Image (cartoon, grey):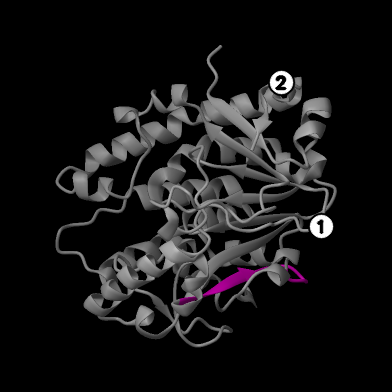
Amino acid sequence: MKRYVEYKAGREILESIRADGLDPRRIGVFAGPAGGPKWFVSVGFDKALMQSGFLKRANRRALLVGSSAGGWRCLAMACPDPLDAYEKLRISYSRNVFSRNDTPITVAGALRSNVDAFISEKGAQGILHNGSFDVAIHAVRARGPAGSATQAIEGATIVVAGLMNAVTSRAMDLFYERVVFYSGKEPPRFLGRFRGRGVRLTERNIRSAALATGSLPYVVAGVRDIPDAPAGVYRDGGLIDYQYNQNYCPGSGRITLFFHYQERIVPGWFDKKLTWRQPPNGSLDRVLQVYPSRAFVDLLPDRRLPDRDDFISFVDDPAERIRRWDKVAELSTALGEQFLEDVESGRIRELVRPL
């Protein structure tokens, strides 16, 4: 049987998984990375978790946390009917059709429609009062010219931010303030460990927060003055917390389950080309990373993951883009099936490697 799923575990959990396998009761966090349409490779894995109730087997409430598309996945999974909400998200996002004349404002309108498609009034209530899960969604609040509505100014700020980030990631604090919107009675424990602030999710702000986490600068208009949050322009949380940049289980023996679309883990959006930049020391110690193998990627159209540039490449043939993205989602069913088989059979003990 071909291996479609790969596993890596952090140093604090590697030996226990090799000895005892993966006990779902140890899962404390499910983390979803940003990455635009690449999330379609996650569809089969996420649906397998929902259909099997895998994350509900945890001894305590589990935290669903993510940025951008990863945040949307988490919000959908926390809805009262998660499979229905997740499918509405997949359909609405994949059916976006843009032209060469679209602007950040029109793109923001399309993404707002995507959010409204899967977070209904009942869905919002279900997320805020979920009996099994808490949710934490990363966003950032722009500082100074980073919040400009003028593309030229915002674009120049992005260039400067990228150059300064190459020297130190702490430079991002000059341009963006990390803001995490969270549900639950108490703030997640990891909020006390980073530079930034937490804001409680409410009925008034949940859709705006969901839109903000996917509002990539220069491409999507920012979300201004989110209710119950400090005034300002809010943008994609992936700018600081792109794929994995936090210790979501501080001081705990619990495991963070991290389904990623690739092997390399990039901390912040500006780190994509900085191959030496790694997640902070200790942040991966209790992480189980699950990702598709090269053999699986070879099954996909053009043998690659979907990408945001597909909107441009197929601008004159959106039906072909949609067909390809649907195919990726269909094929990804194998990832969820193989993961559950590996866990239930104990085979994961032999397959897991050091992270």
Residue at the image position 83 percent from the left and 26 percent from the top: 19
Quarter of image, res 289: top right
Q: Residue furthest top?
A: 1
Query: Measured along the vertical axis of the image, is residue 73 above or below residue 270?
Result: above
The quadrant of the rendering that contains the N terminus is top right
Residue 79 seen in the figure: no
Looking at the rendered structure, the secondary structure element under dot 1 is loop
Residue at 45% from the left image edge and 67% from the top image edge: 211
Magenta highlight on residue 178: yes
Identify the mark at residue 251; answer none if there is no mark: 1
Q: Which mark is residue 195?
A: none
Q: Residue at x 35, y 47 (%)?
A: 94
Residue 65 drawn at (x, y percent) = 62, 57
- The x and y percentages for residue 34 are 48, 54
128 left or right, relative to 336:
right
Q: Amino acid at mark 2?
A: Glu
Residue sitting nearer the eye, 132 or 277: 277
Q: Amino acid at mark 1?
A: Gly
Residue 17: where, in percent of width, then height? 78, 31
Most foreground residue, 186 or 293: 293
Q: Residue 47: image x %, image y %?
A: 58, 39
Residue 333: say if magenta.
Answer: no
Q: Which residues are magenta?
A: 176-187
> In this figure, what is the number of numbered marks?
2
Q: CA distance from mark 1 to mark 2?
A: 27 Å
Mark 2 lies on residue: 350
- The correct choice, above or below, for 280 with respect to 12 in the image is below
Q: Is residue 132 visible?
A: yes
The 10 Å Cα crowd at callout 1, few under 14, some 14 to 19, many 20 or more, is few
Q: Is residue 194 positioned above or below 82 on the image? A: below
Mark toward the start of the polypeptide (1 vs 2): 1
